[in-house]
Amino acid sequence: MNTPLMMFIENIGIVAFAISGAVVGARKDMDIFGINLLALVTATGGGLIRDLILDNTPPVMFVNPIYTVIALVTANIAFLVMYLRRPVPKGITPVYESLLFWLDTLGLAAFTVDGAFTAIRSAHGDNLFLVVFLGVITGIGGGILRDVFADRVPAVLIKHVYALACIAGAVITALIWRYSGNELMASLLGFISIVVVRFLAMHYKWNLPTAHLHDDSKP
């Protein structure tokens, strides 16, 4: 990215999502290779999808390998910490759940803002739908791939208005940038809005309505 702020936001996303992927991999009893792969997919998957949609080839993760390096270094540090703490102490599960939630939230917020500004900088700033869509897909893409690889229902489909928080943050980022031209304000307010919505959804247990279809013919 072109500004120190956006580089900082992008690095937050890479580190946060890499740890998120490593924790999920460890909880699925993956070995060190699996944990590294899951961390890498989580940290770079959304950006990879974004770049393919924009026809930015080769994708940034291949042009600038520093993103891959950061993700893998983070994954191995996380692996070492988790390995040395085996077995998991009693009562630590809620801490892991809270850690995973906040890492996921920070990664989601950081990558959503990054994806929106990537679209804007690619001469698509006037296309609000595309800016918001790319912000959302950059935010949730890596998490979806992580959960598919880990044989889980993607969190975006079931937990704490995950996608709606992402959409809200992308819309706020795009609108503030369009009408003020202030990148700093747009970035911070978009980032903060996602974190706040995710926190409120977790705290008050907000979830979207679901339809439960059961086969009553089964004994």
Image (spheres, helix red, strand yellow):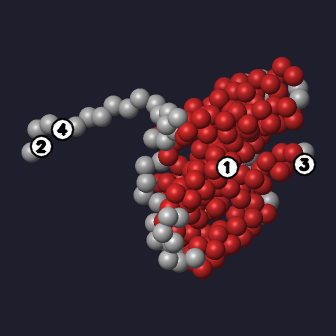
Q: Mark 1 falls on what kind of element?
A: helix
Label 2, label 3: how many angstroms apart (C-alpha)?
59 Å
Q: Position of residue 198 (x, y in %)?
A: 60, 38
Q: CA distance from mark 2 to mark 4?
A: 6 Å
Q: Which residue is mark 3?
A: 4
Name the residue that disc number 1 marks: 107
Seen at 52% across and 39% down, the residue is: 160
Q: Residue furthest top?
A: 179
- Asked if the residue at tag 4 contacts the one at tag 2, i.e. Cβ–Cβ closer than 8 Å, the answer is yes
Q: Secondary structure at mark 4?
A: loop
Q: Whole-Å distance between the Cαs marked 1 and 4?
A: 38 Å
68, above or below 169, in the image:
below
What number is the disc on residue 218?
Answer: 2
- Seen at 80% across and 36% down, the residue is 188
Residue for point 30% across, 34% down: 212
Q: Is 184 in front, or is 47? A: 184
Q: Is residue 144 visible?
A: yes
Q: Residues within 10 Å of mark 4 (few under 14, many from 20)?
A: few
Q: Where is residue 150 drawn, in percent x and y?
A: 47, 60
